[in-house]
């Protein structure tokens, strides 16, 4: 009579578990190389009497930015045409403007709402370096 050999299901199952463990470990380690996304920088801007404070804002290329813009007198606008920003600013209601500084350069900031006789001189600058 011949000998009957039982299938080695427990060894096959063990091999499957080992393979699964190796795959899970490899995927976990692959995620460890990712750098955490840097927090956006938060810059406060005040519009008042035909000026923006600060008048010049310096930002590093690639930086995520949150501008908190307020006014201490009348309604103003905060416009940066090249960055697609045009935000009305009302007294007592600060506006938040989020953007990513992708392209280096100097960007002109203007008041987009007529705010008085010095309105045309109300300008600032964003410099992305």
Image (tube, grey):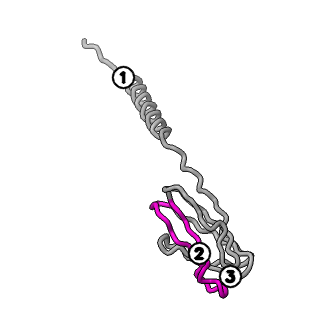
C-alpha span from label 3 to label 2? 15 Å
Q: Which mark, by number, is residue 75?
A: 3
Q: Residues within 10 Å of mark 2 (few under 14, many from 20)?
A: some
Q: What is the count of numbered marks?
A: 3
Drawn side of residue 98 relative to residue 46, left or right: left
Q: Horizontal and vertical percent for residue 8?
A: 36, 22
Residue that mark 1 sits on: 8
Q: Which portion, as a residue range, is magenta?
A: 100-128
The earlier-in-sequence mark between 1 and 2 is 1
Q: Is residue 121 magenta?
A: yes
Quadrant where the N terminus is found in the figure: top left
C-alpha span from label 1 to label 3? 80 Å
Q: Which mark, by number, is residue 123?
A: 2
Q: Residues within 10 Å of mark 3 (few under 14, many from 20)?
A: some
Drawn side of residue 29 relative to residue 111, left or right: left
Q: Residue at x 64, y 61 (%)?
A: 43
Q: Nearer the viewer, residue 2 or 114?
A: 114
Q: Residue at x 47, y 72 (%)?
A: 82
Image height check: is 25 above or below 63? above
The earlier-in-sequence mark between 3 and 2 is 3
Q: Which image quadrant for residue 44?
A: bottom right
Q: Are marks 1 and 2 in contact (CB under 8 Å)?
A: no
């Amino acid at each position: 009579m011949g000998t009957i050999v039982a299938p080695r299901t427990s060894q096959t199952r063990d091999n499957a578990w080992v393979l699964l463990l190796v795959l899970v470990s490899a995927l976990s380690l692959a995620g460890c190389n990712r750098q955490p996304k840097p927090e956006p920088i938060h810059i406060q801007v005040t519009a008042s009497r035909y000026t923006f404070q600060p008048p010049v804002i310096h930002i590093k290329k690639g930086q995520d930015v949150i501008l908190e813009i307020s006014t201490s007198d009348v309604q103003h606008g905060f416009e940066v045409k090249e960055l697609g920003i045009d935000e009305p600013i009302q007294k007592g209601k600060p506006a938040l403007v989020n953007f990513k500084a992708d392209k280096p350069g100097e960007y002109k900031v203007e008041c987009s709402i007529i705010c008085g006789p010095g309105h045309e001189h109300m300008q600032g600058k964003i410099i992305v370096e």
